[in-house]
Amino acid sequence: MLYPGDAPVGLQALGRLAGWHHESPFRVGVNAEWGSWFAYRAVVLVDTDLPATVPMSGESPCAGCADQTCVTACPAGALDECEFSLQKCIAYRRRPESRCRITCVARTSCPVRPEHRYDDAQIAHSYSRSLAMIEALY
Ligand code: SF4
Ligand code: SF4
């Protein structure tokens, strides 16, 4: 079991390399089947003949998304100019009146596969953990 563990592992980068998602403007992976409502939770190294998964075919849902709702929805303007600003996102999330303390407004505004959206309690759980990490680091 490599992750969870002591070593930092870029879970999203691994998922992208495996061909399981495309990158979204708000940097969470997105694909046509699940939207952005999936996550990578563990990395296990195995020495077996498990069949390899086939990389996704087709374009990112973002390629045909004319409205780019996520970009305009972000209250921090962190997705403006086609470049994600981690600094703007973090600064906004830390504000006491922030709408993103326990969610990502950009993510919840994406119209792709809304039927897979996590319920509010799960979203709050995940984002309160990331906010706690941000507060510990900054
Ligand atoms: S709103 Fe559009 S651009 Fe933003 S993540 Fe969803 S599909 Fe991609
Ligand atoms: S968490 Fe909020 S500030 Fe950060 S990208 Fe999402 S919508 Fe923008």
Image (spheres, grey):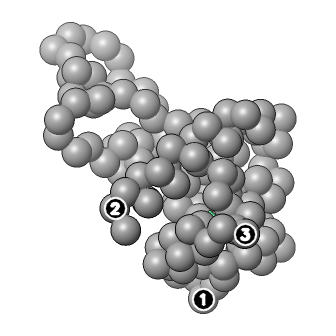
Query: Given contact means CB atoms under 8 Å apart, are the residues at marks 2 and 3 in contact?
Result: no
Ligand 2 positioned in quadrant: bottom right
Mark 2 or mark 1: whose residue is earlier in sequence: 1
Q: Which residue is drawn at 53% across and 76% down?
A: 91
Q: Left or right: where does residue 126 sit relative to residue 98?
A: left
Q: Can residue 24 be seen in this view?
A: yes
The kind of residue on which mark 2 rests is Leu
Disc 1/disc 3 C-alpha distance (Å)? 25 Å
Q: Name the residue under label 2.
A: 137
Disc 2/disc 3 C-alpha distance (Å)? 20 Å
Mark 2 or mark 3: whose residue is earlier in sequence: 3
Viewer-proximal residue, 91 or 123?
91
Viewer-proximal residue, 136 or 44?
136
Q: Label 2 crowding class (10 Å Cα cut-off): few <14, some 14-19, many 20+? A: few
Q: Which residue is drawn at 76% across and 53% down?
A: 108
Q: Left or right: where does residue 123 sit relative to residue 138?
A: right
Q: Can residue 84 be seen in this view?
A: no
Tag in front: 1 or 3? 3
Q: Name the residue under label 1.
A: 81
Q: Mark 3 points at which residue?
A: 97
Which disc, if any, is residue 101?
none
Query: Given contact means CB atoms under 8 Å apart, are the residues at marks 2 and 1 in contact?
Result: no
Above or below: residue 94 compared with residue 87:
above
Q: Which residue is drawn at 34% across and 62% down?
A: 137
Ligand 2 is within 8 Å of the C-beta of the residue at disc 2: no
Determine the secondary structure under disc 2. Answer: helix
